[in-house]
Image (cartoon, rainbow, N blue to C red):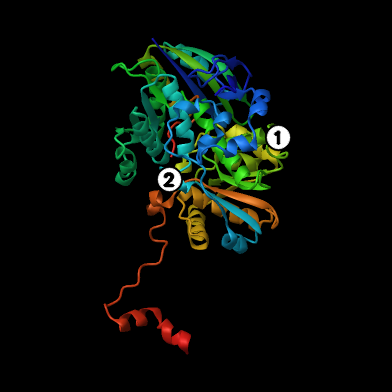
Amino acid sequence: MPFARSLRCRECGREYPLEPLHVCEFCFGPLEVSYDYEAMHRTVTRASIERGPNTAWRYADLLPVDPEHAVDIHAGFTPLVRARNLGEHLGLKHLYIKNDCANPTWSFKDRVVTVAATKAREFGFDTLACASTGNLANSVAAHAASAGLDAYVFIPSDLERGKIVGSSVYGATLVAVDGNYDDVNRLCSELADKYQERTPGGRRWAFVNINMRPYYAEGSKTLGYEVAEQLGWRAPEHIVAPMASGSLYVKIWKGLQELSRLWLIDSVQTKMSGAQARGCSPIVTAYEAGTTNIRPVRPNTIAKSLAIGNPADGYYALKVMEESGGFGVASDDAEIVEGIKLLAESEGIFAETAGGVVIAGLKKLALQGKIAPDELTVAYITGAGLKTQEAIEGALAEPLHIEPTMASFEASIGDPVRQSVG
Amino acid sequence: MARQRVKFTFPQELITLPIIYELGKQFDIVTNVRRADVTEDRGWVVLEMDGPIDEIERGLDWVTAKGVRVDPVPGDIVEG
């Protein structure tokens, strides 16, 4: 916290105090936290970080919050897995999987929400809110429960029952909104503006990805920090990350750049590749067209957690892609399902559809020679597959059905005992 | 009175039409453009609208019916 200095407009550069603001009052550009890196450099060392807890909070000095009052359900410091089998399959000798399924609510959203919830409490808000169809809702509800805050989660009214349980179990109030996706978007934007001050019930709301967005987004930097630390304080040579709003992708890059600026790693030569589902690929489509102008789209993909048709950070993601020399890659739904299966069958990691998007994209980039066989490559898996089981139902082998006899079993599997003896 | 900040994204065929001017004429809304990027084949405008809430909602419905995409300034808010 002592090193966060101000909020700065990413468009016009105007500065604002560290308050619950998210857009520049002058140009309506997005605000981002800026830091006093010289002071940070005098204090933060590899050793000081390594002494910290085995959670995202080991990087507290690099975040815009006070760790003394952290809303901490142990997000972060998830495994970085050497993916030998998948690497061999794809012809990549140094492939790693950052397995963020291992977070408390099984997705990377715990990283951003732990920061947003902490900041919300610092600001004196008594209610956490979000609009979400899945991972974000789960994480907001869990953090609010831990912090003793009220939680309101807005969902489209046609959301499947299974997706509601993962939020309602924590005691959150779920509000099912009749109307389409755009209607929910617009309502929540208006609510965030109005209820930030005070609701009719006298409460003040922190909408994690609206009025808390500058702080919330900073939590994704820990995905960059952790991978560098887990690799022995060095940046990967190539990263493949999923893109929805583009924020996670941009913040991984920011995290690596900050470590370099603090002399904790060498200069960053990482190629940042971003993966989207073809059914919602406004960023990759702009990349392929060679433009930084994003055309909003109507999502139509099984990768619901990446289905953001009008990505807030799309422009900035394209700038990072260009600066780093990375690639944009999109995959259709069948390829996404194959990606989920490939990761599960090769590495024992069951990813949600966003992970299928990443693995499908990784495969394409490897086969096209855009990732060299010797490049130290990290693929980010940001959520667990148990949340999106419906996406792969029908694509998996059915169980063997047998009578309760040895003969029936051996007949069904072709009698491997005799085969091996023979 | 209410105030809303929105982003209009125009398809190519609407770029040359004075839609924001007409919005202010046909409805009791004051429009205030803060940022924009318009080229030959596409364009977007970030603006603020002041007026009675029902007028703003009717105005946005009218703009949407014209074929303009209307989004909140922060982009899509509903996340996975």
User: At 66% across and 48% down in the image, what residue appears?
Assistant: A238
Q: Residue at x 55, y 18 (%)?
A: A24
Q: Residues within 10 Å of mark 1 (few under 14, many from 20)?
A: some
Q: Residue furthest bottom?
A: A422
**Up-down: is A306 above or below B76?**
below
**Amino acid beneath label 2:** Trp
Viewer-proximal residue, A206 or A183? A206
Q: Nearer the viewer, mark 2 or mark 1?
A: 1
Helix, strand or loop for disc 1: loop
Instruction: Name the spot of residue A223 as percent of width and height, x first.
Output: 56, 40
Chain to which the residue tagged by mark 1 belongs: A
* Along the viewing direction, whichever of A91 and B14 lies nearer the viewer: A91
Q: Classify the position of the N terminus of chain A by image quarter.
A: top right
Find residue A174 and report its image quarter: top left
SS label for mark 2:
loop
- Circle 2 is placed at which residue position? A106
**In the visual, does A171 lie left or right of A373?**
left
Q: Which mark is residue A263?
A: 1
Q: Residue at x 28, y 17 (%)?
A: A201
In the rendered structure, which amino acid carries the disc numbered 1? Answer: Trp
Q: CA distance from mark 2 to mark 1?
A: 32 Å
Q: Which mark is residue A38?
A: none
Where is residue A19? Give x, y as percent: 50, 17
